[in-house]
Image: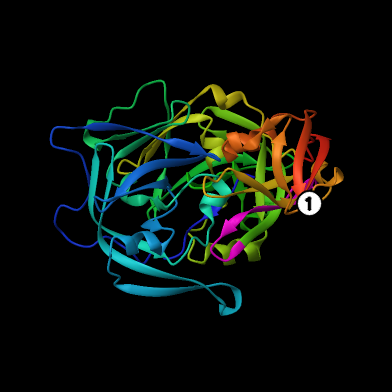
């Protein structure tokens, strides 16, 4: 399942302190740096060394202001001190998880050094990033990086390029888009048609930390009503737990000179979306665009110049599919190579085949899944409608075989 990660809590209350040379910087005389990245569920993961000692992996996310560490055990290893403690609460004031603020943190990536940062530290990995992504992920980096550099994301080459703004010159083969930085986040206005012929100019958060293609906040405008043909689904997980909603197809979205049709679109249930985001202090908007759309382009963010540049890549022509099997998987084990079914969508091909939540997957089409990362296993289940899937599973200690054909429900 393509997870939707919404991390807005505390985004407006934590800032880096001090007037000395703080933040990210290059060595003297260096104007740009290339950093290898991993792509998991359309999310960008980079290597980070925390406080010159601990090698970790962080998601690069345009949707957060301050760095986040997902588990306190890592900051405890470094004996970091904490200046404040919060209790994050869900609906009804129920306590969910404790969080702490630590200051004067350093981050190092290949060719880049950052110092004097504040960081939000969660007591435990309440977001379950590593289980849902199938790889070790320890934190999130956001505005601190984008505010300092022009950031180029090449999804195809799996490369992140950081450029000093004064040394950035956009190439003519890129489409330039105006963006507005509000509360440290990038917003863009695009023409969207969700249903019938009602095209409107809508405001979208550009969110590299969300793996969906497009998300619509239905109550933001009556022209953005949920299409009649839709399916209920789990959209992801936020700070207050599972985010539920509907999945449908929007007719079109124009992004610069490019037009994308029949986009898979998430329509979150308002109560689940707002509560799981952990905050109601949103900039007014109609929705967001995320990794399933952005990954079809090479994308350049110029926050200082309030511009975004895009150039389509070979993935641009790929069809938009949504979870053709109906299965949501969870990675487990020390190596995160054990896969358990965490959800079976109602009326999906997998439900009709008799698969159940808690089943352990051993093989798919004769291939042992322990040899592959979660993103590769998910690709088996989202390749194209009509593909035959033969699975070997373990349920209550007994091996079973199941078979079905991938099917699009929208």
Q: Secondary structure at mark 1?
A: loop
Q: Is residue 228 magenta?
A: yes
- Chief secondary structure of the magenta span? strand
Looking at the image, which residue is at 77% across and 54% down?
396
Q: Quadrant of residue 36?
A: top left
Count of numbered circles in the view: 1
Q: Relative to residue 189, is residue 99 depicted above or below? A: below
Q: Position of residue 313 (x, y in %)?
A: 51, 24
According to the image, label 1 marks what residue?
A: 356
Q: Position of residue 320 (x, y in %)?
A: 66, 33
Q: Is residue 11 left or right of residue 190?
A: left
Q: Nearer the viewer, residue 57 or 315?
A: 57
Does the image show residue 288? no
Does the image show residue 106? yes
Q: Position of residue 218 (x, y in %)?
A: 66, 55
Q: Relative to residue 409, is residue 312 depicted above or below? A: above
Q: Which residues are magenta?
A: 226-241
Looking at the image, which residue is at 47% across and 44% down?
208
């Amino acid at each position: 399942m393509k997870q939707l990660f919404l991390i807005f809590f505390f985004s407006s209350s934590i800032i880096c302190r001090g007037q000395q040379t703080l933040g990210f910087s290059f060595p003297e005389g260096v104007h740009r740096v290339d950093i290898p990245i991993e792509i998991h569920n359309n999310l960008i993961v980079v290597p980070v060394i925390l406080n010159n000692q601990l090698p970790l992996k962080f998601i690069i996310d345009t949707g957060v202001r301050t760095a986040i560490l997902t588990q306190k055990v890592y900051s405890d290893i470094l004996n970091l001190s904490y200046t404040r403690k919060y209790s994050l609460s869900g609906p009804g004031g129920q306590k969910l998880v404790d969080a702490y603020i630590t200051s004067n943190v350093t981050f190092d990536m290949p060719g880049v050094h950052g110092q004097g940062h504040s960081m939000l530290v969660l007591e435990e990995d309440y977001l379950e990033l590593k289980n849902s992504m199938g790889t070790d992920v320890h934190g999130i980096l956001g505005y601190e990086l984008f505010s300092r550099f022009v950031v180029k994301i090449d999804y195809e080459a799996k490369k992140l390029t950081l450029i000093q703004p004064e040394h950035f010159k956009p190439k003519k083969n890129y489409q330039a888009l105006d963006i507005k930085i509000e509360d440290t986040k990038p917003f863009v206005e695009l023409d969207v048609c969700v249903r019938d012929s009602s095209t409107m100019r809508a405001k979208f958060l550009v969110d590299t930390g969300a793996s969906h293609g497009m998300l619509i906040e239905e109550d933001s405008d009556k022209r953005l009503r949920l299409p009649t043909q839709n399916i209920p689904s789990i959209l992801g997980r936020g700070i207050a737990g599972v985010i539920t909603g509907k999945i449908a197809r929007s007719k079109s979205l124009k992004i610069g000179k490019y037009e994308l049709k029949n986009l898979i679109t998430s329509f979150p249930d308002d109560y689940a979306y707002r509560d799981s985001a952990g905050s109601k202090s949103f900039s007014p908007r109609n929705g967001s665009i995320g990794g399933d759309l952005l990954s079809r382009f090479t994308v350049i963010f110029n926050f200082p110049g309030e511009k975004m540049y895009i150039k389509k890549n070979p993935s641009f022509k790929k069809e938009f599919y949504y979870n053709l099997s109906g299965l949501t998987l969870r990675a487990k084990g020390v190596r995160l190579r054990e896969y358990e079914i965490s959800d079976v969508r109602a009326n999906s091909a997998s439900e009709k085949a008799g698969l159940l939540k808690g089943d352990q997957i051993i093989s798919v089409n004769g291939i042992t899944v322990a040899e592959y990362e979660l993103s590769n296993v998910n690709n088996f289940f989202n390749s194209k409608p009509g593909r035959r899937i033969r699975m070997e599973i373990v349920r209550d200690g007994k091996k079973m075989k199941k078979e079905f054909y991938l099917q699009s429900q929208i």
